Image (spheres, rainbow, N blue to C red):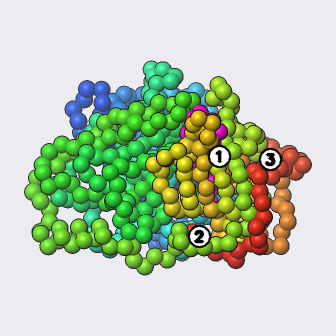
Amino acid sequence: MALSHTASRAGHVAGAAMVLALFAACGGGDGGGGGSRPRSIPQPEVATARDGVLRITLRQAPATITVAGQTFRSNVFNDSYAPPVLKLRRGERLDLTLQNRIGPADVQIDAAEETNLHYHGMSISPLAPADDIFLHIANGADYQYTWQVPDTHPQGVHWYHPHPHGLVEPQILSGMSGMLLIDGVLDHFPAFARLDERYYLLKDIQLPGAQDGDPLTKTINGVLGGVIRLRPGEMQVWHLANVGADAYFHLSIDGVPLWELSRDGNLRAAPEPNESILLPPGARSTVVLQAPDAAGSYAIRTLNVDTGPQGDPNPEIQLATLIVEGERPYSADIAAQLRAGLTRPAVNVDTLTPAQVEALPITRRRTVVFSETEDGNTFFIDGKEYDPARDDVVVNLGDVEEWTLLNVSGERHVFHIHQLDFLVQSINQNDVDETGLRDVIDLPYQQNGVPGEVKVVIPFTNPLMVGRFVFHCHIVEHEDGGMMANIVVLPPGQTAMAPARMRTVTAPRQPSWRGMLPQWLAGTPAVPRPVWEDALCRAPAANATIGTSTSTGTAASALRLR
């Protein structure tokens, strides 16, 4: 049942609350764990477009939820820890009204806070009313985001979450994150077009009573210790997204290979078999899996991830159980056709490929260094904490840059850049993360004096990205602690951009009845409107160029990455 096609926002919110109430404890059921009987992991609601437009309201507010067997109050979207999946196709438009009603809760947040919304993985404009993270929404205010999926946008899994610097970790750890899917991955793998699709949100949370330093609790759709049921030999498509704040998920199912079709919303050339899938914070994957022929129970685990001597613990745990039972769902012929699809390449690929990015001439090379203080409380990019008014990197549309990312700290970091994808060329320290087109990549920690090193090629070629946006560590505790930087993409013929400016949308001021009375008597009552306030505006002299760079040629011709 979709949460779209609404004629009024009030009706939408009421309808959403009623539908979500059908799931015990709002998107997590009993949450599993806590000695409760294992239960099936529920699926989130899926919101789709009508007549080319997906209209939806997301309300951020405290609600009573149950996660991993514990019931408590936390700030979430639409009263659910597993909020709606926003499912769009190329050419469709999103009209999303964000209502900020964040307030005191049992975890993470004890007062009203500003917020906003970032559409992670989307190659859309960084300007309002699209993906502008420099725009904040005050408590009590509403804001309507509007943007259209480009006709050439790659298909795959993305996600949405708040991005107000300094408040990102508590808001995501509270549960304010959800999946965003650009439908169409199976258009390129037609053998799997009729398979059932499932949506799994991988989240971390610090439950009430947890101690600092303890591993964060990890769940699938809010459930720990639940079950997923398949029939012998059944194949399904799973959309997986690490939409948590700080934790790594390294997923495996005992004896069941995971055939990856897409990573971070970028098609694989053909289904790639994996015994496990590493998903650093922010990473996503679409996979096909086939249940074993033998009935039985198979553990779904997240494996141990060594995050380094300064890192947080990510031990192995069993997240859920795959139960295989019942009759076989396919005839022998259909089963053979499905298995054959695992060896066939993607068809009708119409987006930029790794080989095409590899062939682009490099305009400039930079080295960017990620570091932190010994106590792990302050984080830097090239020795600088984040300053929203400083432009750290300035490039021209059409530039293609090679960045060497160095991690000189004793814990992993996760590189992410907004508005685009990059090509991962190499990773050292025997890191198991994937190369190819990505928008997040693990940065290994320094070992024996050797920094973790990742080489990436970044094509600044899509005209939609013109403007100012950010790159940062997607372990959002590190981002909030200073590990973020601004980047400006200039249009042709422009040599500078207006200084960065943080803006806040405030709630309408409600006039008193005394002020309203004369206008009411005159038949023209005032209509309160949101107020824009400048929160920060510093001199452009604060600007500096990040990284060590060398120019190696002219800008490449403009090519669309996404």
Residue type at mark 2: give it.
Val
Tag nearer the camera, 2 or 3: 2
The residue under the point 28% across, 40% down is: 320
- Note whether residue 275 is visible: yes
Q: Are marks 2 and 1 in contact (CB under 8 Å)?
A: no
The residue under the point 23% across, 69% down is: 338
Residue type at mark 3: give it.
Ala
**Magenta segment boundaries in residue numbering:** 406-419
Q: Which residue is mark 2?
A: 357
Q: CA distance from mark 2 to mark 1?
A: 22 Å
| Tag of residue 406 | 1
Which of pointers 3 and 1 lies earlier in the amino acid sequence?
A: 3
| Tag of residue 189 | none
Residue type at mark 1: give it.
Leu
Tag nearer the camera, 3 or 1: 1
Q: Which residue is mark 3?
A: 389
Quadrant where the image shows the C terminus: bottom right
The residue under the point 67% across, 61% down is: 402
The residue under the point 23% across, 67% down is: 339
Which residue appears farthest toward the bottom when viewing the image?
348
x then y, percent, for residue 150: 56, 71
- Note whether residue 164 is visible: no
x then y, percent, for residue 108: 54, 29
User: Badge 1: few (under 14), some or many (20 or more) residues near its Cα, within 10 Å?
Assistant: many
